[in-house]
Amino acid sequence: MTTAPSAVSIRNLSKTFGKTEVLHGISLEIPRGRTTSLIGPSGSGKSTLLRCIAFLEEATTGTILVNGQPLGFEEQPDGRRVRLPAQRIRQVRSGIGMVFQQFNLWPHMTALGNVTEALVTVRRLSRAEAEERGMAQLRHVGLAERSHHYPSELSGGQQQRVAIARALALEPELLLFDEPTASLDPELTGEVLNVMRDLGAEGMTMVVVTHEIGFAATVGHRIAFLDHGRILLDGTPQEVFDGPRHPRLTQFLETYLDRGAAMLVKPS
């Protein structure tokens, strides 16, 4: 088990939509300065868990602490779960960035415009400050020379890298990725994964929902394997993939031989 301090502590979190409980008592520690990969079959609850961490979904029960600060709700000594004031929620959320499967770029804005818009309208930076920071992040993801191109003039991989630059420009302490390569063909997937690999090497705290199993195993410092809304396995890649194999994980990996998982499936 890692001894790195936790950036996020999730305690007994459950999420219900109507009468359907999609997350069941999730508890997870996300270490600071490390990459945590959430893997599992479609419908296992990975994206819902990520959205709860971003407070895009409100958990039904349980608590989430981000850098020790409660997000959304706080448990009282008597066991009651009390919603926090909006200002406190915004303060904690301001340190969280998120990159989605769909790029969600403004089609009428250039790459630089997409990166700087929130800096001007939300963070209230001057246009000059915003553009300086925006260009720095476009250089960070290898797109400085495409800064004045519109999304329609960029490949899917380039658009996703603009989306990553946009998230980085807000200087998050925690960066969440929800299947960031799912909309890309294999040739373009690599350029996005390389940017994420570099961010991990730089010490960015990241939580990545991904079906790129090889990436999850080689870049993730921790792996959480979900199935039917529960965490079945949680540990280092070596503990999850090299130890005694949970039969559900073996079954899952066998369906992803074409996604970098072949090296992880060993004869029994």
Image (spheres, rainbow, N blue to C red):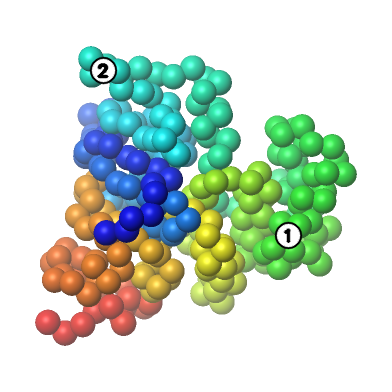
Disc 2 residue type (three-letter)? Pro
* Residue 52 percent coordinates (x, y): 40, 38
Q: Residue at x 69, y 63 (%)?
A: 140
Q: Which quadrant does the N terminus fall into? A: bottom left
Between 236 and 68, the residue placed more toward the observer is 68
* Residue 174 percent coordinates (x, y): 51, 47
Looking at marks 1 and 2 on the same chain, the residue that comes earlier in the sequence is marked by 2
Between 94 and 183, the residue placed more toward the observer is 94
Tell me where residue 10 sits by quadrant: top left
* Residue 88 percent coordinates (x, y): 52, 23
Residue occupied by mark 1: 138
Q: Is residue 220 left or right of residue 264?
A: right
Crowding around mark 2 (Cα neighbors within 10 Å: few <14, some 14 to 19, many 20+) is: few
User: Is 20 drawn above or below residue 228 in the view shown?
Assistant: above
Comparing marks 1 and 2, which lies closer to the viewer? 2
Q: Is residue 202 left or right of residue 21?
A: right
Q: Residue at x 43, y 69 (%)?
A: 219
Tally the marks.
Answer: 2
Q: Which mark is residue 96?
A: none
Residue occupied by mark 2: 77
* Residue 44 percent coordinates (x, y): 28, 51
**Which secondary structure, mark 2?**
loop
| Spatial CA span between label 1 and label 2 | 47 Å
Q: Which quadrant does the C terminus fall into? A: bottom left
